[in-house]
Amino acid sequence: MARRERPLDPGDSPLLRFAADLRALRERAGSPTYRQLALRAHSSAASLSVAAGGRRFPTLAVTSAYVRACGGDVGEWADRWHAVAAALARRRPPPYAGPAAYTAADGDRFFGRERLVEEAVERLRRDRFVVVTGASGAGTTSLLQAGVVHRLATAEDPPAVGTFVPGPDPVAELARGLARLPDPDSVLVVDQLERLQAPAPAGRGRSAGPADLPGLLDVLRAAPCRLVLGLRTDLHDRFAGHPLLAGEPLTVPAPTPEDLTRVVTEPAAAADCTVEDRLLAVLVTGAHRQPGGLALLSAALLATWRHRDGNRLTLAGFHAAGGFEGAVTRGAEAVWAELADGPRQRARDILLRLTEPGDDGAPRALDRRELGDAPGTAAALERLAAARVLTLDRDRAVLAHGAVAQGWPRLAAWTAEDPEALRRRRRLTRAARAWEESGRDPETLWRGRRLAEAEAETGAPGRPDAAYPPGGPEREFLAACATAERARRVQDAVRDARLRAQRRLIAFLAGLLISVSALAAATVPLAVR
């Protein structure tokens, strides 16, 4: 005799109702055993039993096999499965934060950075100031909030912990935050000091700006509590001479494949989900060695979770959610919609430059000077970095992921508008770079027709291929080319003048010689007579 099925747990959840209806369908089919159902469905008896157990939500494939074996309407049950999946998604918080940074409340689902968290907390035990730096998109905010703040708050004897992120009036906000932390063992976590580099929202003033950062650091240095400072690497380098930043910072590196594996699998396991092996391989490979891979991975994971198959995250769900390209497009289009016409043009110029491929085919990291210093450049870079479209690290900028150039339709359309003009502009950029790397060797300078064409393009703002102005290195290169060209023309003119003078002298001497010869010929007969 077949073993009696375990009764369902008490309750009236969507999952329990779904399991009860599956059991009723099996009863109407004559109550076959699960072994008999497995033979009909070409599936395992264990998975079919779990489908009607009411404790785990079955995959769509298992549900369809169960219904088909019981003679039910597979299409109708597929609709019911999707409805239950949506209801369960609303009841259960997602295990991933998506494109947003993790907060202190997300500490239970923050994985992959445990070693860095331990090192930051250990430094804080020894030192009064701890500085944490990283490139944009490296996950510094998540490390501080979901890592350090959460670890301190959940310690056996937790200190008082406050957080500070610069806002419209950072000096006043900081003073109010410090007033609540008079204990020398309390901790203030200061995050995203690079916000001081961003322009204030329209219509609102800012009492502190880039020039006020040293003053703000002075206030922090005099704080009565311990400090953890988080700021982007380029900002740290710019103000590294300040005493508060004098020590060796804790740098947030790019995650290793092992880190990325934990980022994917641990939150899923905590939510009673599994990750398909094929999906895990695609996610880790796609995010590894990408400057902004961590943020895009989190965005793609949230979208994949919303397309999960029961309790499984699958490669099919990843593709249905748009993959990394879909995550890129959603973030890029969101920031594009927020930009006005002027900043849009500047952002377009920057992005077109950043599509230049490197030696390995991936987008090349460019010196920020190469992006030009036109008005709005710095603000556009900050907006694009905040949206994880590009990353900023020290004095360089690079697209956050290869999928930005390949998978964002808007950027792909821009590069296809006039590929020949884009190649000419990239040729100018490479020539300026080669000139700089050669120690400004005069032999690498352009001249003649190539120089004239480059000067015509960069000096004609109305032309579509002159959409973005030359950067500092390109301007210096063209100026050196023009100077060398003028010097060459002067030399040519001097040489031509000398040649003309020599020709005149030769002609004069030749004429004189002829005259003398003629005179001599005329006087010889007279001398003979």
Image (spheres, helix red, strand yellow):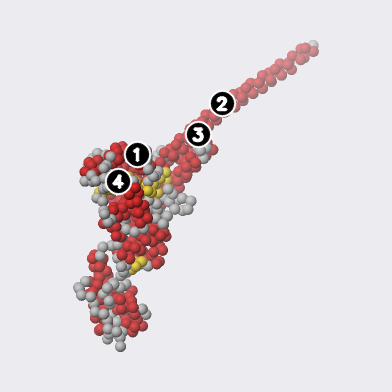
Residue in view at x 44 percent, y 49 percent: 364
User: What secondary structure is marked by label 2?
Assistant: helix
Is residue 285 rendered to the left or right of residue 191?
A: right
Residue in view at x 34 percent, y 67 percent: 274
Please give the residue where the numbered disc 2 appears in the rendered image: 497
Q: Amino acid at mark 1?
A: Pro
Choose the circle earlier in sequence order: 1 or 4: 4
Please give the residue where the numbered disc 1 appears in the rendered image: 243
User: What secondary structure is marked by label 1?
Assistant: helix
**Image position of 370 with respect to 500: above or below:** below
Find residue 227 and name its label.
4
Nearer the camera: disc 4 or disc 2: 4
Residue 302, image x and y in percent?
A: 31, 61
Q: Quadrant of residue 85?
A: bottom left
Callout 3 touching callout 1 (CB < 8 Å): no
User: Which quadrant of the figure contains the N terminus?
Assistant: bottom left
Please give the residue where the numbered disc 3 appears in the rendered image: 485
Q: Residue furthest right?
A: 528
Q: Amino acid at mark 4?
A: Leu
Q: Amino acid at mark 2?
A: Ala
Disc 1 from disc 4: Cα separation? 14 Å
Disc 3 from disc 4: Cα separation? 57 Å
